[in-house]
Structures are given as C-alpha cells and as structure tokens.
Amino acid sequence: MPESLDNVKAANPGPVLDYELLLDCVHCGLCTSACPTYAETGDENESPRGRIYLMRGVTDGKLGLTDRVRSHLELCLDCRACETACPSGVQYGKLIEPFRIAMDQADASRPRGDWFRRYILFGLLPYPKRLRWALTPARIAQRTGALAVARALRLTRLLPSPLRRMVEMLPSPRRNEGALPEFLPAIGKRRATVALFTGCVGDAMFRHVNWATARVLQHNGCDVHVPPTQACCGAIHFHAGANEPAWQLADTNLAAFDPQRFDAILNNIAGCGSMLKEYGHHWHDSQQPARAAWAAKVRDVNEFLDQLGPERPCGEIRAVATYHDPCHLLHAQKIHDAPRRLLALVPGLELRDLPETELCCGAAGTYNLMQPDMSSRLSRRKIENIRHTQARVVITANAGCALQIAREAREQGERLAVVHPMEILDWSYRGITPRWQSIS
Ligand code: SF4
Ligand code: SF4
C-alpha cells in the first residue's frame, strides 16, 4: 500500500507510489508516439516510458531528484494519452499525479507561496464569484474594444506571463443568463433525476454551457438539481501539488450532493469530470468508501445522455464542424463515441474527422499558464490540424480546450467558433440558428 501523501516529508517522493504500478511497464515503447511532449521534442526523457524510468530511478534511490529530472516530469501534461496507447494497462496517471504532489512537498526550498499560485491559482480560479468580479475590468475593456486594441498593439505583453496568458484566453462575452436555479423540472415524462456540477471556471466563464446542458437534460425528461453549496472539484489544487485543499473541496462536494437522491451526478467539463470520478482513489481515510460510492454516480453529460437514449433533435444546424477530443474525456474517462453519436443526430451538421484528435491541445488544466512554451507548440499544432479539416466550427467538451483553441485561433487570425456539444444540441432542440461570428 502506498504511504499517505500527507506523511511524505522525505526528499524522495517515491514512497507515495504503489511500486507494483511502476513494474507494470515493460518498456516496450508503444506509448511514445502517442505522447504530445515526445512528439514535439523527440526526447526519450519526455516520453511516458522515459518518465516511468525516471520515477523508478528516483524511487529506487539510483537517481537524484535533480532540476533536470524535475523538469522532464513537470513538462508532462498528465493528458494520459499513454494510458490509451499502452497494451500493458499501465496506469500512468496513478504514478505521475501522486509523484508530482510529493515532489512538490518534498522540496521545502522551492517557492510555493509565489503570488500567482497564492492569489490567482488558489485564491481566484476555484471561486466563481471572485473570478467573475476579477474579470469585470477585462470584460469592460472587451466590450469597449480597448482589449482588442491592446492585443493588436501587443500591450498585453507588458503583463507578467501567466496573467498575459489569462487575458489572451478570455473568451468573447456571451449573453449573461444569470445563475442557474436550484431546480429545473423535466419537460414531459420524467426519465431521471440528476444533479448538475457547474464548476468554478465553468460557472464564471461558461454559464451559457451550463444553461444549455440543463435545458438539454430537461428536454430529455430529467429533473435537474443544482446544489448551491457545491465547490470547485479540486483539480486546480491537486494538479498544482496542493493536496490538502483539494481533499477539503472533495469533501465539500460530498456533503453538497447526496448520491442517494440522484440517478447521476453530471458535469460538462472533462477535466472536472475526471477529477470527480477519481475522488475514491486519491485519499485514504475513513471517508474513502463514501467518496468511492459518490464517485460511482459521476457521469459526463455526453456519456449520460448517450446511455439514456436522447430525444432526436429537429432544428437544422448548418455548419461544417470538427470534434476535438479533450484528453480528460478520451484518455482519462475513455469516452470517444458518445459525443460523436449525439452530434450525428443533429440535422445539417457535417462533422469532419480531426487529424491527431487524440493529441492534447496544450491546455491541460493550468499547464497553459505554467508551461507556456510547450503549451503554445501544441496549440499551434492543433490549429494546423483543424485547418486541414476546413471546418469553421470546433466542438469540444472541455472549458480548458475551448479557451486554448479559441486563443490560438485568435492569435493566428483564424476565424473559428468553438462550442460545446450541449450548445449544439440545445440550439437544435430549440430551433435556434447560431450566429457563429459572435462566438470565438
Ligand atoms: S507505458 Fe505501456 S506502452 Fe509505454 S513503455 Fe510502458 S508498457 Fe510499453
Ligand atoms: S500523460 Fe501525456 S504528456 Fe505525460 S507522458 Fe503520458 S502521454 Fe506524455
């Protein structure tokens, strides 16, 4: 059994790992071509096999945790494409995630209280109300055109790097529909009772997607509950090495959603969904069985609707589109067909295959803020692939991917609308013709 993350104080983070998981890797290398960082650098140390070697070397005490070793491990996107590619079933996420948390905790000399982590990553992003307030000046600049001018004159480059990235990613303002009510009743015969997880960045920037999701669920006979005391899923903290706050957020959500009341706990953001589904795995205390039972109720909304059997949408959506697979939906949750099957129901929508769709767009949670160089290389590669399809609409089921792809498209002067599958279904159910020009 691995040691609890809480107890790790030693310079070697290896003891947190289940050593047997390291041994599952037979070093065949079949995962390397699926790895985005290896695809970009060709460096074996930046491949899944290489990183497993590094973690094992450190764990066995044969390798020191040098800055170079750290940087190879920190450059990993945790996209888990290697898990999909691996024929031996190596659970790479269960290796890299605890290892990186412990790596962070083990080095007391590293600055963990830097302003960006403290005030933005941990103090702002997980709290939708604060985030909405903080975005107000940028929203005003956006509506008055000042932001476009600042971007054109490259004045945003004067901001510190992570803040600049955030400003560059700010999506176009959409109609503010207000907060979701705590209950939205099923339309017609009730087929299910569900709870909706609205997310932190999701609630602050993608409320329109939450509304679209709720309406689609209502249309499909679901009573939709939106528990008001829900919190961020904890992924921002967890992936940045702050285990304790992530743990607390998980337990806040456990208290907010009573799994007995709901057929499913739904979410529409792949990164959050993946974290919620893993609540039963990360922490080993007396609450662990309750977390595991709770997590067993979590479903991505595409997965849930596909299993429920969706009502056929009637409204025509005329568009040439392509679907980008979010890593945390495709690789972490193994959901590939469900969104495609739902979109195939929409009359008029032409869905073209995206080359290298399984390759990360470089968003990867807050990776795009912390590792801007590799992140930009991957987003440029993604836009190049989108260009090949000649689609003008990109559909993706993750807020982070949507922000990243839209940012890169803007930067390259590419006019692309980036939307969620639930928006497409919602428009089709309601007979609305989207104005693509206003979505980017
Ligand atoms: S992770 Fe899997 S595919 Fe990659 S080298 Fe190890 S066994 Fe082979
Ligand atoms: S998680 Fe992604 S970036 Fe990391 S080793 Fe696996 S494929 Fe490569």
Image (cartoon, helix red, strand yellow):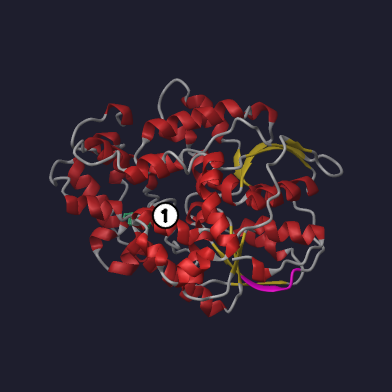
**Quadrant housing the N terminus:** top left
Residue 135: percent from left, percent from top = 53, 50
Position of residue 317 in the picture relative to residue 174 (left or right): right
Residue 409: percent from left, percent from top = 51, 71
**How many residues crowd mark 1 within 10 Å: few (<14), some (14–19), many (20+)?**
many
> Residue at 19% across / 32% down in the picture?
10
Q: Identify the image quadrant of residue 129.
A: top right
Mark 1 residue's CB less than 8 Å from ligand 2: yes
Helix or strand or loop: what does disc 1 sit on? Answer: loop
Instruction: Judge whether residue 396 is colored magenta.
Output: no
Relative height, residue 323 to residue 237 (above, below)? below
Q: Amino acid at mark 1?
A: Cys
**From where the camera sits, is residue 182 visible?**
yes
**From where the camera sits, is residue 87 visible?**
no
Residue lying furthest top in this view? 286
Instruction: Compare residues 160 and 261 and report the one nearer the observer.
Output: 160
Residue 378: percent from left, percent from top = 40, 66
Position of residue 342 in the picture relative to residue 329 (left or right): right
Query: Image quadrant of ligand 2?
Result: bottom left
Q: Which residues are magenta?
A: 317-321
The residue under label 1 is 79
Mostly what secondary structure, the magenta segment?
Answer: strand
Instruction: Compare residues 112 and 175 and report the one nearer the observer.
Output: 175
> Residue at 61% across / 36% down in the picture?
297
Relative height, residue 213 to residue 253 (above, below)? below
